[in-house]
Amino acid sequence: MSAGEICSREVVFVRPEESVRTAVTLMRSAHVGDVVVVEEQPGGRRPVGILTDRDVVVGLLAEDVDIDALTAGDVMSSDLITVPEEAEVAAAIELMREYGVRRLPVVDAGGFLAGILSVDDLIDFLAGQLTDIARLIAREQLREQRRRT
């Protein structure tokens, strides 16, 4: 299974020049914990950073910074880690673990934003896989019981 197959294709995004308040408002209205910061280019949106609810609360509000005076580009995490759509889920998990991130923008072959993969997406996917394994075991046990009777 690939990152592109399980990621969310509905990505909330802002441009670098948009205000932090706009980003926070979008996060709240969409019920998400991040916005991907993108630059519009011919062919699509290229991710250049990410701004999370944690960045806002811990990095700005806790320091009593005026969020109306800042843009998303001012405060985004610009050391952005992305994952190609075709990357296997295991590779995406490894990237998240290695870099200590809970969300990965998913990019297409041209490097344009195609989706976002979150820890929640991975938990849903893995829970489904575990359910399938549990059903397999139960079915095997039932088959074995029927053979003995």
Image: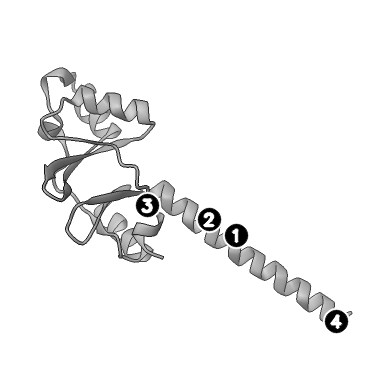
* Residue of label 3: 7
97 relative to 78, above or below: below
Q: Closer to the camera, 138 or 43? A: 43
User: Please, what is the three-letter code of the amino acid marked with disc 2?
Assistant: Ala
* Residue of label 2: 127
Quarter residue 25 falls in:
top left
Q: Is residue 54 left or right of residue 75?
A: right
In the drawing, what numbered circle is on residue 131? 1
Marks 1 and 3, how far apart at CA = 20 Å
Residue visible at 77% across and 76% down in the picture: 143
Q: Tell me residue 148's x, y (percent).
A: 85, 81
- The mark that comes first in sequence, 1 or 3, is 3
126 relative to 75, above or below: below
Q: Tell me residue 137's x, y (percent).
A: 67, 70
User: Please, what is the three-letter code of the amino acid marked with disc 4?
Assistant: Arg
Give the mark toward the camera: 3 or 2: 3
Q: What element carries label 3?
A: loop
Disc 1 crowd, CA 10 A, few/some/many (<14, 14-19, 20+)? few
22 relative to 55, above or below: above
- The mark that comes first in sequence, 3 or 4, is 3
Colour mode of the rendering: one colour
Marks 2 and 4, how far apart at CA = 32 Å
Q: Is mark 1 on a helix, strand or loop?
A: helix
